[in-house]
Image (cartoon, coloured by chain):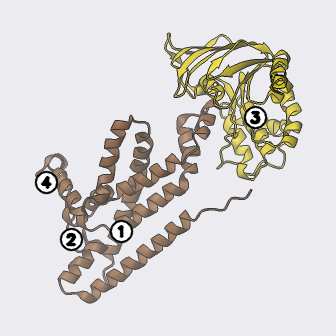
Amino acid sequence: MDLYPLYNSLRISAISAIVVFFIGIAAAYYIAKLPRFIKGILDVIFTLPLVLPPTVVGYLLLLVLGPKRSVGSFFLDTFDVRLTMQWWSAIFAVTVIVFPLMYRTARGAFERFDENLADAGRTLGLSNSYIFWRIRIPYCRQGIIAGVVLSFARALGEYGATSMIAGYTPGKTATVSTAVYQLWRTGNDALALKWVLINIAISAVVLFILNWIEKPQRRRS
Amino acid sequence: MLYVNIEKKLDRYTLKAAFECDHNTLALFGASGAGKSMTLKCIAGIEKPDKGVIQLNGKTLFDSEKKINLPPQKRHVGYLFQDYALFPNMTVSGNITAGLRKLPKAERETKLRELINRFHLDGLEDRKPDTLSGGEKQRVALARIFASSPEVLLLDEPFSSLDTMLKLQLIPYIRGIIADFGGETILVSHDIDEVRQLCHALIPIADGVTADAQDTEEYYITLKEQFENLK
């Protein structure tokens, strides 16, 4: 059994989770400082991929990254790089789909932060970046780790946008989810079932980890 | 010398705080929600007044006309928060060291030992704040403030979360710390007994507006008379 789809799915999900960790935290942190009106609009835009069908996200991405479209043709002409139908093309799709999960969990965690701690840090002369990385992030770490794990789990399950932008090439762009569809479509039911079971097992493990992280830690008094 | 003359529009009233404090201990005395904490936050630079001037030892911390508004990091203000605001992810040593970051690394260790001794925190160095008692938390918060060598001390209801017995022990202790400090100290309190123990002068504040400074004992007598007339 060729394990390439598993390897490919895991690396796409891991890279997307890391990317989304940084941009999700940045978006969640900076949006809180914006005027209410802009905040409302941006919040809707940032959350849209969560509710849109993945095919719509795939379509929109192709509209930008496709070889005959603005960004896509620029990369093709200047760097001779085609942005679609590569194994890493799926990272674009998965990152966009998964971003709202990270953004919303990080925002929820930041909202529960005790601002007095940041104020205390500032009066003590601590720099804003020290306060952010050494006080704010550790305080919110439970929510942030949960966001990353949830993003990773959802990334493993992405099918719609990925199949549109990366397609299915065995040994090249195949992921677990696209492999299941292709194997089933071509009548290879037994192998499809194996991949289904592998997928369920991985997702279950990830969700166990998530529950374990989110378990409220009892405080000693 | 601390000079404050500021205005800030708030939801319920407009804060108008005007007073000065010259090498002594001054209380801001008033009911909850009268604008005491907000005044301290403006001095510390956490909140920005709409207009006015704040000066400390000849240095302008805030001046709306000259468009000066120093960040809290540059104001050298020691702010004791009501709930102490200890960093929960750091140990006692970590919290105090956070205040020492301006010092060169080599000096931090000696200064840390000195503060731990001075604030009787021996044996608690590796504990996290949520395992400490109220009195211990307060000492850690004070050690952390003195680690950052403040020029003015702002005490925001320092005894409000402590029980009476602990308060009895801590008042003389805080009095000693204020005396050692020697600089300007502003105490915010709604408890006249606390104020009498720690400050000779107070500024009454009501609905965001400060009155002239008064002698604490004289103020106490008029307050007591008002109480007796109630009977």
Give the residue pinned by disc 3.
B158
From this viewpoint, is residue A86 visible?
A: no
Q: Mark 4, residues whose alpha carbon is within 10 Å: few (<14), some, or many (≥20)?
A: some
Chain letter of disc 2?
A
The residues tagged by marks 2 and 3 sit, at their Cα atoms, a distance apart of 66 Å
Is disc 2 in the same subunit as disc 1? Answer: yes
For chain A, give the colour. brown
Is disc 4 in the same subunit as disc 3? Answer: no
Give the residue pinned by disc 2.
A168
Nearer to us of marks 2 and 3 is 3
Give the residue pinned by disc 1.
A156
Q: Residue at (84%, 15%) from the top-left corner? A: B218
Nearer to us of marks 3 and 1 is 3
Give the residue pinned by disc 4.
A67
Q: Is mark 4 on a helix, strand or loop?
A: loop
The residues tagged by marks 4 and 3 sit, at their Cα atoms, a distance apart of 66 Å
Is disc 3 in the same subunit as disc 1? Answer: no
